[in-house]
Image: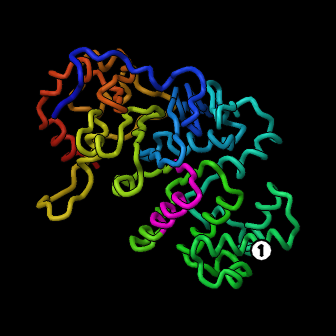
């Protein structure tokens, strides 16, 4: 497999280009979001940079604890404070840096410019308010509409997300709806003010396979209809293959690989990405057990020195343990935070090391 487009690739700096690109709806540069706890400083998001283009679906993938959700909360300025705060970097929406904005200014941006679907609707929906009342409350918060006009729009939004009998469902409470219906209601609420960007944080995790497919199809249909951008956060590579155009792979609070979807699946470069792809079950594959990545994500209060993946990597050598790799340019739109880009011959390390680790991992 081709590893790099040049013998000695230089560190990638394209994610930090100055100025605002009109094609980008969101531009994140050097973002650091830390949680200050009694147990130490949790570096949940540690120097993350990326951009979301207009009308595209950008996916963020990684294990639990890698910083995916905290990145999303940072984009909405919803990091719980205390103990957390954005300590460095910028988040630009249509060229405007939202990090220094007041809470009142952010309330005008949330919903209108950027909105979010959370992982579990039952923890996000108010159990003592009807679905219609919750959606109309969001609409009235951001738009100058009367109570009746907001309720009419709520019903129209429920119809948009294909909830049957929307007039009746608007009068019901969250517990009266199925899981798929609640997720559709969350999507209706998130889209009620026509945001430019929709963050979908594990939108199908708690749903069965059939409903997952329906929700993903709905998001794609709504995206085409209203032209919004989607930032899709997931640990499911199958969902990414179906839904996204580009992928960010996060590990230990950093982006370790970025590539178009087709490139990532055909020619993943970072060993962590390789491990994620190898762990996917395959139809028709004769295998006694699934491959796993040995070890676990390290504690965010004590990220390892050098490459943060080195203690789980079969290719790691001395340089990996002491020198933090930059993002190397691998190909068009493809970058990887791995020294193998500069020393591709090191990839000849025996694959048995991975197999042995998988056999002993729990």
Q: Is residue 129 visible?
A: no
Q: Is residue 65 left or right of residue 113?
A: left
| Figure quadrant of residue 188 | bottom right
Q: Nearer the viewer, residue 78 or 304?
A: 78
Is residue 138 shown to the viewer in this render?
yes
- On the image, which quarter does residue 3 sit in? top left
Q: Front-most of 361 and 262?
A: 262
Decide: few, some or many residues near mark 1? Use Cα within 10 Å; few <14, some 14-19, many ≥20: some
Q: Residue at x 48, y 49 (%)?
A: 233
Q: Position of residue 70 (x, y in %)?
A: 57, 41
Q: Quadrant of the N terminus?
A: top left
What is the span of residues highlighted in magenta in the rendered image?
215-231
Where is residue 263 shown, x and y percent of the image? 29, 41
Q: Magenta stretch: dominant SS?
A: helix
* Vertical position of residue 244 compared to residue 32: above or below: below
Residue 241 placement, left or right of 149: left
Residue 5 found in image quarter = top left
> What's the coloring here?
rainbow
Circle 1 SS class: helix
Would residue 188 appear left or right of 129 to someone viewing this image?
A: left
In this rendering, the answer to whether 303 lies above or below 232 is above
Q: Is residue 160 above or below residue 199?
A: below
Magenta stretch contains residue 227: yes
Question: In the image, residue 227 lies at what x, y percent?
Answer: 56, 53
Question: Which residue corresponds to the image point at 72% horizontal and 50% vertical from the top-left?
Answer: 112
* Vertical arrangement, residue 152 with respect to residue 236, above or below: below
Is 260 included in the stretch rendered in magenta? no
Question: What residue appears at the point 68 percent right and 47 percent down from the top-left corner?
Answer: 113
Residue beneath label 1, please?
Answer: 152
Is 127 on the left or on the right of 71, as rendered? right
Count of labels in the image = 1
């Amino acid at each position: 497999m081709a590893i790099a487009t040049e013998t000695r690739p230089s560190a990638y700096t394209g994610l930090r280009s100055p100025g605002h690109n009109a094609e980008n709806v969101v531009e994140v540069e050097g973002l650091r979001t830390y949680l200050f706890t009694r147990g130490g400083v949790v570096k949940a998001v540690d120097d993350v940079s990326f951009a979301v283009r207009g009308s595209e679906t950008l996916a963020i993938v990684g294990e639990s604890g890698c910083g995916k959700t905290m990145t999303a909360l940072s984009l909405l300025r919803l990091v719980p404070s205390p103990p957390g705060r954005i300590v460095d970097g910028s988040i630009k929406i249509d060229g405007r840096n939202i990090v220094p904005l007041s809470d009142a200014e952010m309330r005008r941006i949330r919903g209108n410019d950027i909105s979010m679907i959370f992982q579990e609707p039952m923890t996000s929906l108010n159990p003592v308010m009807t679905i219609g009342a919750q959606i109309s409350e969001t609409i009235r918060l951001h738009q100058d509409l009367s109570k009746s006009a907001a309720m009419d729009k709520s019903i129209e939004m429920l119809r948009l997300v294909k909830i049957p009998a929307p007039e009746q469902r608007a009068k019901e409470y969250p517990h009266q709806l199925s899981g798929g219906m609640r997720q559709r209601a969350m999507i209706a609420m998130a889209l009620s003010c026509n945001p430019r960007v929709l963050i979908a944080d594990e939108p199908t995790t708690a749903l069965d396979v059939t409903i997952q497919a329906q929700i993903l199809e709905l998001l794609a249909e709504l995206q085409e209809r209203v032209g919004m951008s989607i930032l899709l956060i997931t640990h499911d590579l199958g969902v990414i293959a179906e839904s996204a155009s580009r992928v960010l792979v996060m590990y230990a609070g950093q982006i370790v690989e970025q590539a178009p979807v087709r490139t990532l699946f055909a020619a993943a470069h970072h060993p962590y990405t390789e491990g994620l792809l190898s762990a996917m079950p395959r139809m028709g594959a004769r295998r006694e057990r699934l491959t796993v990545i040995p070890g676990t994500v390290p504690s965010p209060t004590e990220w390892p020195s050098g490459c943060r993946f080195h203690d789980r990597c079969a290719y790691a050598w001395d340089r990996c343990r002491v020198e933090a790799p930059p993002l190397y340019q691998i190909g068009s739109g493809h970058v990887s935070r791995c020294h193998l880009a500069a020393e591709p011959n090191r990839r000849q390390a025996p694959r048995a090391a991975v197999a042995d680790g998988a056999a002993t991992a729990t």
